Each structure stands twice: as structure tokens, then as C-alpha cells.
Image: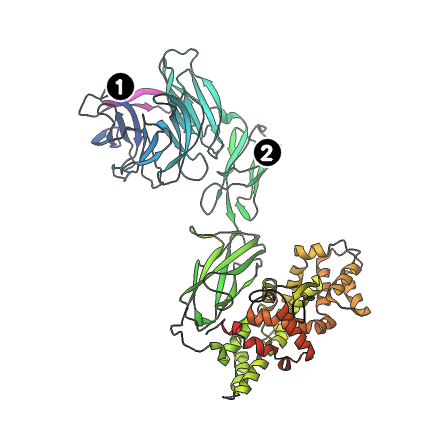
């Protein structure tokens, strides 16, 4: 543009960095004699042809629009009138919709502002979105300076100290992808003009600028919103007048390198050819297959003629410099729970800067739905977790239910455990049992939560946390005056399956136990006794003895007892089981998973579950701290029996020690597992611990709490019932223990009035 001429002059590039051999003048009309300030190019109407935007001082703050026709000619349309001291300083697609937007700078205002007018794709623009506090902006260049995939600006700006004093500077402004920008910090002073490009081919946006003298300066970007120290290039030996002013970046020589064109007051325009790529180096970028954005924290290993490691920055970029020309190299990316394509890149006979780009695909876990819905009368719902990516390895993840408006005591049965994906498996599930109470509660919710992934990462939806989902229980009750459902034989039996066996009843089992109660007809004393016997049968069952009771004995063998306070028959302390409900539930559910006594192959399922549980148990930090691997086999076994309170027979002790073979330590995990099971499943321990566990399960099963929680602040209640059960030699009917718990207000109010 020329200061006082109403035309734009185009100089065509001959392909070798030479301009001016061919040119064209593009006229435009204004209402007054123009004072042209700048010209910008963009495809405003998305027709694939370059359009021109010309800013003029007279008329004030007006942008002339010239739409390109594709053959070097242009058609003028209605101009854009700016206001509020704004001037056009650039164009860019700030909201990533494929349509050029206008970038405005506001001058002469304390604090300064940046404005954005979003384009509509047909040559029109919306009102300005103003980002205050970004300093007085004179010109901008666009790039992703902080590596978040959203357009940012490097701006030649001025911070007003005390109007009208202004300190010029380069300012990085981070964009949010919607037209708003925040100042990140400023760099050098005295900026005349600036441009952006990846001048050293490291995948990060750099800035080149002029300051009005005879030098061009380049600031290398760090990919996280910062700029390095200036690198200076002298363009002319001497400088007269204003010196270098305008500067643009482009590949003027067609060699794939970003060059610079600089306008100088004395000598006119000149092109600076980029020779940076002549230095042997390897650069590259790693992107995330899910977003196509840079993947940070990837370890890049360089091997071959030289060895080195580095990590990708927040934009996924990496760079190895000062390498040996003509040498051979291998570049390999690694990151936990990611697989890369390609797995590595081989570069032979290195020359200049060569690139090695990779795409990382994570092994991910997520719920198959973010909102599960179940009717209260359904009994249960299956929750699925999907694994994606490389399925060749083993992945584990813990799951848990967390009370929302629904309670694990009365609305559902808490589900806690670990899902294990074997090689090739992409889908695993767990079941949440639903209680069909008679309480009018409306819709209630439970949070489903995944944690502690091993061999994968969480990958959720765009909205909400990636490792949680919501379970909504739809209430089916409208009448608050219905009787308590626990008085129904079917409900009573089903709830015992939930509370003691952690599963839905099999049809034959449900019918068998319900018929035991129904056989009494209307004989209430008979019904009451059947309730007691049916209830106790769940504790006495083969299934519970080998699941829940085994868990209690395992904790006993591993950690012994704890002391609890009681005021029964005077204040005193007594030894009580160490296991707590929040430990008991996930371990019991792990051993009982898929076990239905009487079903085909149930013994194999149970044995496999026992082995998996014991193997996991002996590797927990609590156990390894109590039983370090430096212990001898005899020390290990003797401590287990001592904690269990059992004096073993010589054969029992020897059998447990012999699990370690000839080893002198106890580092063998499988042997530790087998020895622990020998003690936990010892017949003497089973007999000695029976009554204590029976009383404990009254609290765990019926009341869904620890003996010293809820209404109880100590172990007085536990002490009372254990004393009474012992007095009656374990006869729970005579001791009236089961009767007391299943008729208690605390138990009945779990389900209804």
C-alpha cells in the first residue's frame, strides 16, 4: 500500500525469492482522500480465492474489502467501520471454524484491549469480542505458542505506564478457542513489526521481529507460551532513517524452510534465506490419536551414532541437535500405557534436519455409559467397563460404588472389587444389587467409580470426569402406607442373598428357602422360627463359610486381633476381630464372584477365586510390612499361627513351612499365598473363631456396619451377644441372637416403615 494512494500493489514471486518482475495495481474507492495504513489477505468468503483488507486513516478506522476473482482482479464491497479506537491489525481463524476472523487493537486507552470480530464466511463480521488488559496492541501474528491446540497471538504491543507514555514489547496472548485472549507475559522492547514461523524446524512457533534498526531478531518458542533470548541477523551494513520495519515469513525458495522478507527504509525489501536446516539434527512431534494434538511426556530415545533421551514438550515436540552428518540413527518413543505408530523410525545418512513423527494410542478404560438407569424392582444391574487400544497385555482396575442420594444400607448393595482384563479382553463387568424397598424416595443416584488402573489410563467423554459414571435408581413406590417388605418371604430370602452371598438368588435356592417360611401358613410362631433358621442358614452355608468367613479368618491369621472397649458387665477391653466392613466386602465379593454352590463347576470357580484372593492379599503393602520377605519360612508360618491363636500340630506346621521348599527366605509370592491359606483354612482356627465371626456377621450382614459404629460407640453390643452365644454353646436360637437382629428396628428400617 502507498500512504496517499487508493490502490494496492501486488508483486508476484518468480519462485526464487525475486519480486517485482511482474506486478499489478488494484484500485479501490473511498469517500475521502485515503491515507492507507496496511493491507491484509484472507479468503473472507471461502471461495478459494485470496481477498484483500485495506485499512485507512481517512476515513478513520475504516477497512476496505476487496474480494478476489482469482485472476489478479478484485471487486470492492461495502467497507467495515470500526469504532472505540480499534484498528485492524491482522486476520486469523481464532475459533477454528475455517472462517477468517478480524483481529483488532485498541490504542490510546489505559490498559489496552484486543478485539476479535468473528467472520460469517460470506464477507461479514460479528461485533467485537473484547479482551481487556492485553496492552495497546499494534500488530499480531498467530500461532499455538502454549501447545494447547488453540490459537494464540504474539503481539507487538505497548504497555501504558502513565499516559501517554508507552513501553513497546512483544506480548504472548493465550487464546481459549472462542475469541478471548489472556496476556501471558512480555519480552523485548522497541518492536516495529513481527511475524511467526518455525524457523529452526523443532515443531514450535517462533517469532521474528524488527526494531527499526538494521537488524532482524528471532525468538525461539518453548512450546508452552514462552520465548527465548533474541538471535540477531544484520541485514544491511549501515542504517539510515527508520531502518527495518515490515517483516513477513514464508518459504520463498521452495525448499521447505521458513524464510524472511524485510522492508528497510533505505534499501527497500530484501529476502533472508533460512539456512538453519543445514545443521544435522532430528526433530519430530508425537500426537495423541484421540485428539490429534501433541502428546507430552513421551520419552524419546535416540540410538545409533550418538545416544540421548529427551521428553516431548506440552505440544508433543522433541529435538536432537548437533548430530553427526551421514550417520545412522534410531528414534524410539515410549510412554506408559501407550503404543506408538510406528514403533520406531530409522534414519540413515543423516543430512540437515530430518523429521520423525509418531502417533500415540493409549490403552484406555471407561464405563460404557455415563448414565445407567435401573428400576428399583429389577434386582440388579450389570455395569460394563470397556478397554480399548492394545489388548495384548493384562490390565486391572478397581471399582466401587459411592453413595449419592441412594444409600448402600437400604437402596443397593455396595459393590467393590477389581476387574482384571486378560490378553485379548476388551469388556468386563460387575453387578450392583438393587434393594426393592417400600420407601417412597423418588429417583436416587449412586456414583460408580474406577480407580488405580494398571496397564491402562482412563479415557472418558468430553464432559465430566473420565473415571466415573452415574447409576440412577428409579423408585417404584408411591404409597407410603405399604407394609415392610421384609415380612414377605421372597423379599426376606432375596435380601439374605444380597447381604451374605453378594449375589442375586438362583431360582431354585430362592424357592427352596421361601418355601421353608411359607410352609408355616399363618402360624406366626412357626414363621418366626423359620425366619431365624433360614437366616442363620446363610451364615452356616458352604458358600458363606468359604467366602465371607474365610476372609475373616484370613485377616485373623495375618494381623491377629485388636482391642475393643466394652461396658457390658463393667468397663473393660476385649479382643475383637480386626477386619472392618469396608475391607470385608470387597474381599468377600472377590472370592464369591461367580460362585453358586450346586451349579456346574462351582468348586473350580471357588478354588480359582481363593487362589487369586490369597495371591493379591500377600502382595498388599500392609501384609508385606508385617511379613517382610527376609523372614525365614519357619518365622513366617509361626507368626501366622500365633496371630491366629492356634497351636498347630507338628504336621500342620511342617506342611505350611514346606510350601517354601528349600528356600531360606519367604520371597516366593506363591509360597506365601499357600502358607497363608493353610493357616486361614486350619480346622482348629475354624472352630475357635466360629462364634466370634457369627456375631460379627450380625453387624456386617443385617446392619451393614461395624460393631462400634452407628448407634454403638464401642463393642458393648458385640460383647453382649458373644457372651450370650457362648453361654448357649453356639445355639443361636436359644441365645435369641439372630431373632434380635432380624426383628430390630435398625434392620427393619432399612426396607420400610
Q: Which mark is residue 3?
A: 1
Q: Nearer the viewer, mark 2 or mark 1?
A: 1
- Residue 713, magenta (yes or no): no
What residue is pinned by disc 2?
A: 328
Q: Is residue 578 above or below residue 124?
A: below
Q: Badge 1 local density, few (<14 within 10 Å), some, or many (20+)? A: few
**Mark 2 vs 1: CB contact within 8 A:** no
- Looking at the picture, tell me which residue is in the foreground, 221 or 501: 501
173 displayed left or right of 400: left
Residue sitting nearer the eye, 412 or 224? 412
User: Where residue 240 sits: x, y (%)?
Assistant: 38, 11
- Left or right relative to 129: residue 467: right
Q: Which residues are magenta?
A: 1-28
Q: Is residue 703 above or below residue 508?
A: above
Whether residue 11 appears in this view of the structure is: yes
Taking the spot 64% from the left edge, 74% from the top edge, the residue there is 721
In this view of the protein, can residue 251 be seen by the observer? no
In the image, taking residue 538 as reference, residue 112 lies left or right, namely left
Q: Secondary structure at mark 1?
A: loop
Residue at 46% x, 47% y is 290
Q: Position of residue 375 (x, y in %)?
A: 42, 69
Inter-mark Cα distance, 2 to 1: 55 Å
**Residue that protrudes farthest toward the left in the picture:** 31
Amino acid at each position: 500500500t502507498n500512504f496517499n494512494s487508493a490502490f494496492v500493489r501486488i508483486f508476484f514471486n518468480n519462485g526464487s525469492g525475486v519480486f517485482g518482475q511482474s506486478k499489478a495495481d488494484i484500485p479501490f474507492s473511498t469517500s475521502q482522500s485515503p491515507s492507507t495504513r496496511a493491507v491484509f489477505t484472507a479468503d473472507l468468503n471461502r471461495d478459494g480465492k485470496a481477498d484483500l483488507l485495506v485499512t485507512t486513516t481517512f476515513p478513520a478506522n475504516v477497512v476496505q474489502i476487496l474480494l478476489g476473482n482469482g485472476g489478479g482482479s478484485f471487486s470492492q464491497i461495502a467497507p467495515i467501520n470500526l469504532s472505540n479506537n480499534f484498528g485492524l491489525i491482522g486476520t486469523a481463524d481464532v475459533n477454528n471454524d475455517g472462517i477468517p476472523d478480524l483481529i483488532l487493537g485498541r490504542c490510546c486507552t489505559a490498559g489496552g484491549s484486543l478485539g476479535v470480530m468473528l467472520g460469517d464466511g460470506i464477507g461479514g463480521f460479528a461485533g467485537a469480542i473484547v479482551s481487556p488488559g492485553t496492552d495497546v496492541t499494534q500488530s499480531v501474528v498467530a500461532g499455538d505458542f502454549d501447545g494447547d491446540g488453540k490459537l494464540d497471538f504474539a503481539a507487538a504491543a505497548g504497555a501504558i505506564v502513565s499516559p501517554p507514555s508507552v513501553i513497546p514489547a512483544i506480548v504472548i496472548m493465550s487464546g481459549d478457542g472462542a475469541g478471548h485472549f489472556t496476556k501471558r507475559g512480555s519480552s523485548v522492547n522497541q518492536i516495529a513489526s513481527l511475524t511467526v514461523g518455525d524457523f529452526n524446524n523443532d515443531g514450535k512457533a517462533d517469532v521474528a521481529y524488527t526494531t527499526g534498526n538494521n537488524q532482524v531478531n528471532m525468538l525461539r518458542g518453548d512450546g508452552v507460551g514462552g520465548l527465548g533470548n533474541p538471535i540477531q541477523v544484520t541485514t544491511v551494513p549501515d542504517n539510515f532513517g527508520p531502518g527495518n520495519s515490515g517483516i513477513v515469513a514464508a518459504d520463498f525458495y521452495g525448499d521447505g524452510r521458513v524464510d524472511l522478507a524485510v522492508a528497510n527504509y533505505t534499501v527497500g525489501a530484501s529476502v533472508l534465506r533460512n539456512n538453519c536446516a543445514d545443521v544435522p539434527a532430528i526433530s519430530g512431534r508425537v500426537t495423541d490419536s484421540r485428539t490429534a494434538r501433541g502428546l507430552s511426556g513421551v520419552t524419546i530415545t535416540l540410538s545409533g551414532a550418538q545416544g540421548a533421551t529427551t521428553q516431548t514438550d506440552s505440544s508433543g515436540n522433541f529435538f536432537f541437535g548437533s548430530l553427526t552428518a551421514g550417520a545412522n540413527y534410531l528414534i524410539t518413543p515410549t510412554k506408559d500405557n501407550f503404543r506408538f505408530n510406528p514403533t520406531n523410525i530409522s534414519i540413515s545418512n543423516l543430512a540437515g534436519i530430518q523429521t520423525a513423527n509418531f502417533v500415540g494410542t493409549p490403552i484406555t478404560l471407561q464405563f460404557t455409559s455415563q448414565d445407567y438407569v435401573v428400576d428399583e424392582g429389577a434386582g440388579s444391574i450389570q455395569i460394563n467397563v470397556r478397554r480399548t487400544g492394545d489388548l495384548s497385555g493384562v490390565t486391572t482396575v478397581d471399582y466401587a460404588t459411592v453413595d449419592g442420594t441412594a444409600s448402600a444400607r437400604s437402596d443397593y448393595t455396595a459393590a467393590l472389587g477389581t476387574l482384571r482384563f486378560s490378553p485379548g479382553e476388551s469388556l468386563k463387568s460387575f453387578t450392583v444389587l438393587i434393594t426393592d424397598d417400600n420407601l417412597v424416595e423418588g429417583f436416587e443416584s449412586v456414583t460408580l467409580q474406577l480407580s488405580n488402573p494398571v496397564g491402562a489410563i482412563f479415557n472418558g467423554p468430553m464432559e465430566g470426569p473420565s473415571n466415573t459414571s452415574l447409576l440412577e435408581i428409579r423408585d417404584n413406590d408411591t404409597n407410603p402406607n405399604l407394609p415392610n417388605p421384609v415380612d414377605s418371604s421372597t423379599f426376606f430370602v432375596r435380601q439374605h442373598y444380597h447381604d451374605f452371598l453378594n449375589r442375586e438368588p438362583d431360582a431354585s435356592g430362592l424357592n427352596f428357602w421361601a418355601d421353608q417360611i411359607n410352609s408355616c401358613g399363618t402360624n406366626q410362631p412357626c414363621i418366626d422360627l423359620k425366619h431365624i433358621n433360614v437366616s442363620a442358614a446363610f451364615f452356616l452355608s458352604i458358600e458363606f463359610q468359604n467366602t465371607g468367613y474365610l476372609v475373616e479368618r484370613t485377616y485373623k491369621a495375618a494381623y491377629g486381633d485388636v482391642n475393643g472397649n466394652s461396658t457390658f458387665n463393667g468397663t473393660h477391653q476385649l479382643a475383637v476381630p480386626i477386619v472392618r466392613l469396608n475391607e470385608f466386602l470387597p474381599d468377600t465379593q472377590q472370592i464369591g464372584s461367580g460362585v453358586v454352590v450346586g451349579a456346574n463347576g462351582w468348586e473350580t470357580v471357588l478354588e480359582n477365586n481363593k487362589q487369586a484372593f490369597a495371591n493379591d492379599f500377600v502382595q498388599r503393602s500392609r501384609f508385606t510390612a508385617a511379613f517382610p520377605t527376609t523372614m525365614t519360612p519357619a518365622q513366617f508360618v509361626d507368626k501366622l499361627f500365633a496371630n491366629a491363636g492356634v497351636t498347630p500340630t507338628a504336621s500342620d506346621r511342617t506342611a505350611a513351612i514346606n510350601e517354601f521348599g528349600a528356600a531360606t527366605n519367604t520371597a516366593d509370592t506363591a509360597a506365601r499365598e499357600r502358607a497363608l491359606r493353610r493357616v486361614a483354612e486350619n480346622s482348629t482356627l475354624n472352630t475357635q473363631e466360629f462364634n466370634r465371626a457369627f456375631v460379627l456377621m450380625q453387624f456386617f450382614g443385617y446392619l451393614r456396619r461395624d460393631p462400634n459404629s452407628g448407634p454403638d460407640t464401642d463393642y458393648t453390643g458385640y460383647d453382649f451377644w458373644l457372651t450370650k452365644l457362648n453361654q448357649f454353646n453356639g445355639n443361636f436360637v436359644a441365645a435369641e441372637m439372630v431373632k434380635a437382629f432380624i426383628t430390630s428396628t435398625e434392620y427393619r428400617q432399612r426396607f420400610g416403615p
